[in-house]
Amino acid sequence: MSEHEHPTSQQSIRAEAIESLLIDKGLLTEDAVDEVIVQYNERVGPMNGAKVVARAWKDPAFKTRLLADGTSAIAEFEFSGGEVDKLVVVENTSDVHNVVVCTLCSCYPWAVLGLPPKWYKDPAYRSRIVREPRRVLEEFGVQIAAGKELCVWDSSAEIRYLVLPEPPSDIDSASEEELAARVSRDAMIGVALI
Amino acid sequence: MISELSGIEQPPMANGELVFEAPWQGRVFGMARALSEAGLYSWDEFREYLIEAIAGWEREGEGDYAYYDHFLAALESLLADKGVLSPGPLEIRCSEFRHRPHGHDH
């Protein structure tokens, strides 16, 4: 394909122009930008959250600490950086299902879940999950029984939420690592079940 | 900064979803974070600009929602307000890049 069929977008040119001007001014290096992208793409991600969830399932004392103070409890894992000034972990039970949104923009617990998926930033999700959560969850393939309470948590710069999903039936026989591998990002946002 | 994490084999491409739809989106995200980490502004400051950029689009209600367009606009406004990026030089640099010899493609 020729480049005429793939015109460089206006945004792409703008982004490149900004980067080059900032590099000229000595405010930025190309390596610093690369480093951030690598960090968020490869080193941080939902697997951090999955480890937290799996430990909470296996270790009741950890779970108690996690629900009491998420920020301190995840410090035990030495995940650092990202955006976790205050992490609140909300537990799904037979009576309650929790789901997380950021109605204003896209606040998200980066240190435990990596970067948010595209739909999380979408205006449709951001408004509809508040107005009609059961219906939106059905579109994600999750049926919440009519009698079950549904809590929608609105994230902010100050507070990020992580859903602790209901454990599978074999938590006693499965290892923490095996369990972590089964915890999906979407389950920790509350739009999927385990 | 994020410390090295052990035992992580897979990048966060869960459910087959790519984090960035185009390379420039990754660059814009990387710039915004790197400048914040370097102390040019706090991440909360950036967030305020991002909220404003998205709110502006919601008020006008025109065009498809494109998250990273807002992210780019927020970064531009913040850098302009910080006095490190003026519209004039930016337009000149954009124009230079637009008129680069054919075949130059980053």
Image (cartoon, coloured by chain):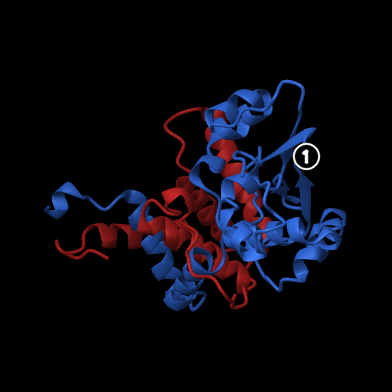
Chain colours: A blue, B red
A31 versus B77 height, above or below: below
Q: Residue at x 56, y 36 (%)?
A: B56
Chain where mark 1 sits: A
Residue occupying the point 42% across, 53% down? B18
Q: Is residue B28 left or right of residue B82?
A: left
Vertical arrangement, residue B80 with respect to residue A166, above or below: below
- Determine whether, in the image, residue A91 is placed left or right of residue B59: right
In percent of width and height, residue A108 lies at 64, 51
Q: Residue at x 47, y 76 (%)?
A: A25
Residue nearer the viewer, B51 or A150: A150
- Who's the residue at 50% across and 49% down the image? B73
Residue A69: image location, x then y, percent = 85, 58
Q: Which residue is mark 1?
A: A93
* Image quarter of the C terminus of chain A: top right
Residue lying at the far left of the rendered structure: A2
Number of numbered markers? 1
Amino acid type, mark 1: Thr
